[in-house]
Amino acid sequence: MSELSRRRMLVSGGTLGALGALSMASPAHARSLMNWTWAPSGSVAGSGAGADPRWVWDEEADPLLASLLDRGAIPEVNRLLWDWERNDQPLPAGLPRDLRAFIEKARQLPSWADRSKLEAAAEFNKSRGLYLNLLNGVGGGMLSTAIPKEARAVYYSKGGADMEDRVAKTSILGFAVGSLNAYRPDGSCMVNSVKTRLVHAAVRHLLQQSPHWGGDIPISQNDMLVTWHTLPTFAMRKMREWKVPITQAESEAYLHVWQVTAHMLGIKGEYIPATWDAAEAQSDQVLPPAMGPTREGVELTDILLGQLAEQTSPGSVSRPLCNALARYLVGDEVADWDEIPREPFWGAAVRTAWPALVKFREGLLPLPLVPEAAWALDEAARQYILFYLTKGKETKIDIPVVNRPE
């Protein structure tokens, strides 16, 4: 049975579940996750079937997008949805009825969403924006290129042919989650989450037709969990490592905005961690086996860091400093997989200056004790954020109709 036929059988049998973005890289990695042991009792749903998320996809979006692609409807859908931007904005007239019904359901917040926590998360994102944007944008980006299935999915899908555009579109969702009005009526997080869910379903359908793919169905529920942990779980771990002061209420609020976003992206409630302890346990199970080196990941990393160095103002942030800061964020193992060069001078400077800069920003270190190199790092962090987040304003998320051109 062909992979495409197998997928259609799964869809028609109703065994697909929600969404994702990546998974295992080799048979050895696959064996290490053969037994899914994370308990659904630790999820926001509090219970569930306990099915292995590697074999769960999106039972609602998958057949819909496959049908829209087969019907040739996507170009008109993209045109109609181009100016659909606000959470409270009605859908445009003219959308196919099945798509309209899906979006109207998918754009609703879950019953367990807490408005007060979402507002608190917005304030936390504001007060800790430098760290969060750096960790989610740059750290998450470097981690993603060291996840073989994700790197290959990006590389061989349409976005892999134009990484500047791909970064811009990825930044749209990240910027929306971190904005002050993320889930308010005038925000855009609900819209961009639903658009991303549609894109993932289209990529799942298209990639299996690529002669370069040859793997499991992409963007499984497990894949999405892997990606999710490279964002909030990774960011919270690093901020704790840097000793950034975070209250219990702030911690819970930051987790909550990402829990809601996971739901909006199509992750099933039984897989969304209810607490940070549950998130840590799940991350430890799904993330390490999913990571490793690939040629595609190395190439994507070089493109991303090269773009950053080119986009910054002349002489303000050098490629060696970009390399050193990226290596500091993700660690030597991941940086070696991504083939990020070691920079002896800047590497040592970052290890010394960044902790001092964090302490200074948090009022824990007086100005005279901050190393001179800290201000170069401060500028580098700002340039990273400028590159990864403001580029999201230059484009909009649209649904692909082809894979990466040959």
Image (cartoon, rainbow, N blue to C red):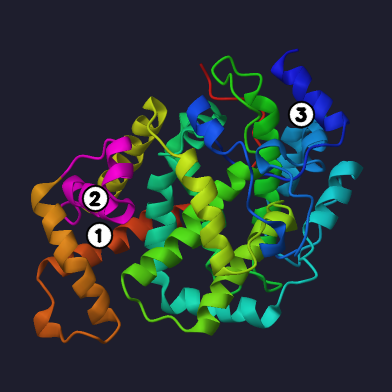
Residue on which disc 1 sits: 380
- Amino acid at the residue labelled 2: Cys
Residue located at (87% from left, 30% from top): 12
Q: Which quadrant of the structure image shows residue 238?
A: bottom left
Quarter where residue 43 is shown: bottom right
CB atoms at circles 1 and 2 under 8 Å apart?
yes
* Structural distance between the alpha carbons of marks 1 and 3: 42 Å
Q: Nearer the viewer, residue 282 or 293?
A: 282
Q: CA distance from mark 1 to mark 2?
A: 7 Å
Residue behind mark 2? 322
- From the viewer's perspective, is residue 368 above or below residue 155? below
Q: Earlier in the sequence, mark 3 or mark 2?
A: 3
Q: Identify the image quadrant of the N terminus.
A: top right
State which region is magenta: 314-342
Ranked by sequence position, the earlier of labels 1 and 2 is: 2
Q: Badge 3 is on which residue?
A: 69
Q: Would residue 150 be counted in the magenta stretch? A: no
